[in-house]
Amino acid sequence: MEIYDLIIRDGYVVFPDEVKKADLAIRDGVIVKIGDRLDGKAKEEYEASGLHIFPGMIDVHVHFSEPGRAHWEGFETGSQMMAAGGCTTYFDMPLNGIPSTIDRKALLEKGEIGERKSVIDFGLWGGLVPGNIDDLEALAKSGVIGFKAFLSATGNDEFERADDFTLLHGMKRIADLGKVLALHAESDPITQWLKQEKEKDGLFSADDYAATRPVQAEAEAVERAITYAELTGCPLHFVHISSGLAIEKIESAKRRGLDVTVETCPHYLLFNHGDLFDKGAVAKCAPPLREREEQERLIACLMEGKFDMISSDHSPCPYELKDPAANNLFEAWGGISGGQFSLMSMIELAVLHGIPLHKVAEWTASAPAERFGLSSRKGQIKNGMDADLAIVSLNGVHEVLDSNFFAKHKQSIYMGHTFPCQINATFNRGKMVYQADAISEGVQGEWLKVIDSCIAVNN
């Protein structure tokens, strides 16, 4: 008789092309058998009758700000928050820590902290900034997921935006290293010029902020980056794209055979400029939330398959950096705190728009795994894969409250929002890390390093 560590019974499993009731048998953190009412015994069983089993989300875009700014969000609270949202792997961005992750020493320091504190698996991005071209190879050989650069001001002195020469030199080097460059695509000349015009006239409203970061600023930066990619052969990944015009340019590049992928974030799909007007700085991000018509255009692009994946761009800060009593809207930190809610957001959109649940699994798990070199272990529910699973009730609801939001700081555009679903449990490599608004004790994530397209972990 087969002996397993865990059997999850009678759940509706979200496979790549269908949803089907099945049992899952897990041994040594890996799915080893899938079928109807499996025989055998297990040390533990989990009854999932009436529940849906999604592959654990892979969130390729979060900011945990450690070391140096753990009071913004660190690996401990950040990873707990992700686990509570059904996420089992996340990639931390390189810019908000001190030091930023722009050389091997900083990478190893951050990775060591993550290995001690993260309750789920994680990867790390490296940065492309002026002056660190010679550091890219060491970062690549040390296992970074890829590289991140900004085409507009970052807001942090530790991580400068990449000028055009840095971009061209860096993209050529990244292409040679077989990595991907992720880009925050907004034109710095356009955004800075418009910002100065508003500040000169003392205009700081929600409408004024949005006017300084128009669709044209995003589209121009996207087009320029694509041109540079054609010259250098560099694979690109565009983060948090917020406009249909930018998507048109990315779609054109894909049709020409360029190696380009694109993400958007749930906040661009669930919220719009009216929320910035009503809620103030907790709804400030860059690019900004767009008008309702643009929001609807983005949802249409999603349904038409023009977005490859979804990420949270969880970008928190202490409330004093958002406090309207201390900052006007231009001065306030720009970032949405909401990494816990990405999977539930996409399920909400699926319910509203009749989107098949297997598409949600593609956007949140299989597509990120495929793009960033994790698909040998993660991203799908099948034999031989890590047992990274989100157990979801489509009959329950989840109202976002201080008490069930695991982020360090509770101020968020999502506060008070009610999702038509709830995360009942999260398993990372077969171990339950979250259940019933509680994080399990003694759970620990792995630092996933991608070296020569293979996953490596520290033993």
Image (cartoon, grey):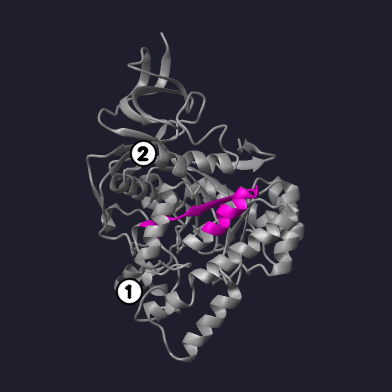
Q: Is residue 261 magenta?
A: yes
Quadrant of image for the C terminus: top right
Residue bearing the label numbered 2? 356
Report crowding for label 1: few under 14, some 14 to 19, many 20 or more residues within 10 A (C-alpha). some
Residue at the top extreme of this rendering: 1
Depicted 273 relative to depicted 31: above or below: below
Report crowding for label 2: few under 14, some 14 to 19, many 20 or more residues within 10 A (C-alpha). some
Residue 277, label in figure: 1
Place of residue 137 in the rendered image (x, y in percent of width and height, measured from the top left): 74, 51
Q: Amino acid at mark 2?
A: Pro
Q: Is residue 304 visible?
A: yes
Depicted 19 relative to depicted 85: above or below: above
Question: Could you say whether the residue bearing mark 1 is in a helix, strand or loop?
Answer: helix
> Closer to the camera, 63 or 185?
185
**Magenta residues, start to end:** 248-269
Q: Amino acid at mark 1?
A: Phe
Residue at the bottom extreme of this rendering: 201
Residue at (41% x, 83% y) in the render? 204
Does label 2 or label 1 sit earlier along the sequence? 1
> Closer to the camera, 328 or 362?
362
Place of residue 189 in the rendered image (x, y in percent of width and height, measured from the top left): 60, 77
Place of residue 161 in the rendered image (x, y in percent of width and height, measured from the top left): 63, 69
Judge from the rendering whether residue 204 lies leftward or rightward of residue 436; answer left or right. Answer: right
